[in-house]
Amino acid sequence: MLAEVVAIFSAMGWAGDAVFVRLGTRKSNIVAAMLVSYTVSISCVWIYLLATTPLDFLRSPAMLYFLISGCLQPLFARALYYEGFTRIGVSRAGPLRGAEPFFATAIAVVFLHEHPTLPVYLGTVLIVASIWVISWRESGQAKWRLLDAAFPLGAALVSAISQTLRKQGLKILPDPFVATAIVTSTSLLLLISFVWMTKRIHLLRMKRESLLFFGGAALIACSAQVSNFVAIGQGDLSVIIPLLNTTPLFTVIFSALFLRNVETVTPRIIFGAIIMVAGVALITLR
């Protein structure tokens, strides 16, 4: 039960991170948000590891899994997600990002030859239905293209692949702090390389008002990341991934509470989030 509780705590953390980043990007951009997030996470985790853990873990075969996972998530997954909610809003992008169980089930069936039970398939259908409900744009609402929904959905796919790699790495080296350090450090190096090669250093500049929000988001994201690895390492992936994807519920709640002046949470979005959470529950309780 501990792994399940930690997974839900992680889901709440990612929802809080999204709200803080959304507030910060009003006067800055997602690249600056990711830089602050990775820098804070890496600083906190590496200081802890250097003070408490021998560096023998660097020779572990698990490093390969963590390195590949770090190339996918959090960098690409978070970039797609952040870009998604700057285009269509947190309250829409959050639930769409929660489609990860659908992709995780597909990966399990096609590549791992698993045989999900009927509740898993029913839950997947509900998740797909919720995507349709959330993506439907009524007349009079803020303009955005249906293609924009591909960003949070892409984040969900990348995350499902990455979580599978993390599980394999944690089977070899069950240390969530090591996993967090390697994965986040890899993403930071890729981010800096991308910014340098594309000559977009200016994107790393941010206003003081944004730094406050990004700093708060970074602390929350760090705890959510560690909790993510703890849950994956201690629980079954088929159970933990759906629980991690209860984030949409918390995203909608937090958006309604703290983003009233930034974006509108419509009844349709709330209904879509409820459907998605119901799908996640079916998969979890199969």
Image (cartoon, grey):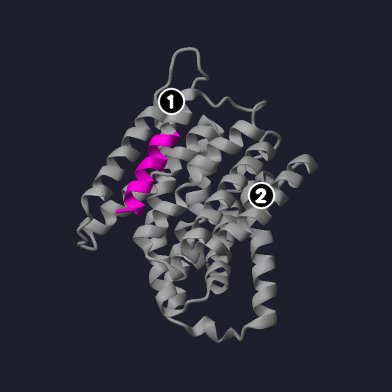
Q: Residues within 10 Å of mark 2 (few under 14, many from 20)?
A: many
Q: Quadrant of residue 265?
A: top right
Compared with residue 245, is residue 63 higher up or lower down, i.e. above or below?
A: below
The single residue placed furthest to the top in the displayed view is: 140
Q: Which residue is mark 2?
A: 217
Disc 2 element: helix
Q: Name which residue type carries label 1.
A: Arg
CA separation in Å, label 2 and label 1: 28 Å
Residue 211: x and y in percent read: 75, 46
* Along the viewing direction, whichever of 242 and 200 lies nearer the viewer: 242
Instruction: Give the residue at x 68% y 56%.
Output: 219
Amino acid type of disc 2? Ala
Q: Is residue 111 magenta?
A: no
Residue 275 shown in magenta: yes
Q: Magenta segment range? A: 273-286
State the image coordinates of residue 181 (x, y, percent, origin top left).
58, 69
